[in-house]
Image (cartoon, rainbow, N blue to C red):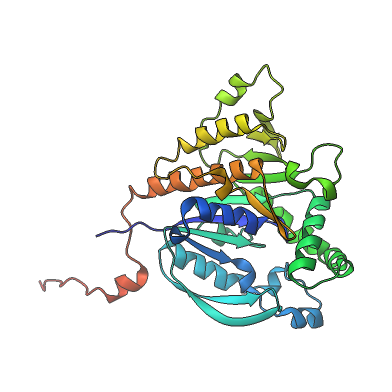
Amino acid sequence: MNRQRPIILGIVGDSAAGKTTLTSGLVNILGPERVTHVCTDDYHKYDRRERAELDITALHPNCNYLDVLELHLERLHYGQPILKPVYDHATGSLVRPEYVQPTEFVIVEGLLGFHSAVMRQFYDVKVYLDPPEDLRRVWKVKRDTAKRGYTPEQVLAELEKREPDSRDFIRPQRQEADIVVRFSPPQGIPAAEAGPTLNVRLVLRPTIPHPDLSYLSESYANTDSAIRLGLDRDKGRPVDILEIDGHVTAEHAAGLEKAIWQHLPDLRALPEDQFGDYQDRTEVRHSSPLALTQLLITYHLLRKYSDVAQIPFAPPVAALSRMKPAAVPVP
């Protein structure tokens, strides 16, 4: 009996760009029992002390076992288990590896997931998180002071040290994504004061088919809508742009949510309080633009899941090696 290979989602972005927050909502929507989560930060070669001694940042490819990550992505693509390294962010240490058996959906998130063409070929959907740098700095200071024991001055100093590697290795991966997600404060509001009113701008590239949301342009053409769909160019390439303002009304947000849920017949619609949440220091807040972004990405995963279900799943190489060759008649 053939079984279906896993669907692999790649989420890439700089440190504190929101990768874990986006992932947690996707896990809730799909169901924790159906999702395997892999963080590419676990593939660091050096612990925090060694990086300081070698004067290398975790963002540099030479600081990571990217060749091992490539091999592991291939195994996950074919539904095979991996022995994944583990990096403990709390202590900055490399600890005991973890045995990972892929489930129906595999979410691979981290800094360098799209770095090589070998890696990119194993993703079904690729998402890049692209917040403005001033907003990302606010997020990183909040996270690293609350969860990792740093002072604000230490976090800002580390950001400055990392900037050349962010420029050379992290941000260039944006061009490889199918969907680019950019949360940003409303015009005139400082990043530190934006809170749950962040807008989102989704660049939807034609590298994958997107759901038909053209009715948005028709329904809200004559209104000052907080949800807009249009055509634009990104880095010279034609794209669809979906914009959702942080002050979107509950009515408009619910309308778009309903439209996307209709494309997800295999899932039961969840109450909005089960996704779209994010951590602001010790407080949990809700964002409708985040919730809608998570639903749209879920659509792509389930669409790909349905497509792959029609394709016979080849047995893994290891299984083939154990199969006895057919007898060849002697002439």
Counting from the top left corner in percent of width and height, residue 161 is at 85, 67
Name above or below for residue 49 compared with residue 226.
below
Quick check: can you spot residue 12?
Answer: no
Image height of 315 relative to 88, above or below: above
Residue 257 horizontal side relative to residue 54, left or right: left
Left/right placement of residue 294 relative to residue 60 reads: left
The residue nearer to you, when weighing 233 against 299, is: 299
Q: Residue at x 68, y 34 (%)?
A: 243
Residue at coordinates 52% horizontally, 54% vertically from top-left? 28
Which quadrant of the figure contains the N terminus?
A: bottom left
Query: 273 or 38, which lies in front?
Result: 273
- Tell me the quarter of the picture where residue 292 sits: top right
Residue depicted at 59% across the width and 19% down the height? 218
The image shows residue 50 at horizontal and vertical percentages of: 75, 83
Task: Residue 233: tell me if it is visible.
Answer: yes
Between 211 and 329, the one nearer to me in the picture: 211
The residue that appears at 15% across and 73% down in the rendered structure is 327
- Classify 162 as above or below 237: below
Q: Residue furthest top?
A: 222
At which x and y percent is residue 142? 79, 61
Q: Nearer the viewer, residue 92 or 115?
A: 92
Q: Quadrant of residue 13?
A: bottom right
Q: Is residue 254 left or right of residue 199?
A: left
